[in-house]
Image: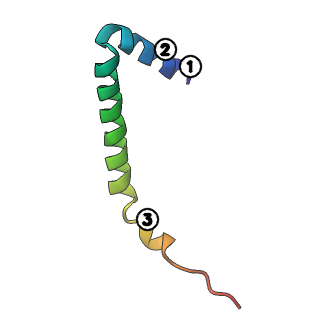
Amino acid sequence: SIFLSTGIGHMYQSMGFTSSYIVLGGIALCFTLLSFITLDKARFFALQTATTH
């Protein structure tokens, strides 16, 4: 997190507060969409229930 904080701090100084948050939000959105697409097929396994004996 130290390295991320340093990079984000430099981004604040060079781009400004508002633009930095738009870029960070876009990155978070891309990761969310990528995770939704790649993990969509894994949901099938999560829906199976364990049988009790």
Tag 1 residue: 2
| Residue 11: % across, % down | 36, 14
Label 2 and label 3: CA atoms lie apart by 35 Å
Q: Nearer the viewer, residue 24 or 51?
A: 24
| Residue 46: % across, % down | 50, 70
Tag 2 residue: 6
Q: Residue at x 29, y 28 (%)?
A: 22
Identity, as a three-letter code, of the amino acid under mark 1: Ile
Classify 10 Å Cα crowding around label 2: few (below 14), some (14-19), many (20 and above): few
Q: Earlier in the sequence, mark 2 or mark 3?
A: 2
Classify 10 Å Cα crowding around label 1: few (below 14), some (14-19), many (20 and above): few
| Residue 41: % across, % down | 38, 66
- Residue 31 shows which numbered tag? none
Label 1 and label 3: CA atoms lie apart by 33 Å
Tag 3 residue: 42
Identity, as a three-letter code, of the amino acid under mark 3: Ala
Query: Which circle, 2 or 3, is nearer the viewer?
Result: 2
Is the residue under label 3 in contact with that under label 1 (CB below 8 Å)? no
Label 1 and label 2: CA atoms lie apart by 6 Å
Is the residue under label 2 in contact with that under label 1 (CB below 8 Å)? yes
Identity, as a three-letter code, of the amino acid under mark 2: Thr
| Colour scheme shown | rainbow
Work out whether 43 lies above or below 1: below
Most extreme residue toward the bottom is: 53
Q: Quadrant of residue 25?
A: top left
Query: Which circle, 1 or 3, is nearer the viewer?
Result: 1
Q: Residue at x 34, y 25 (%)?
A: 21
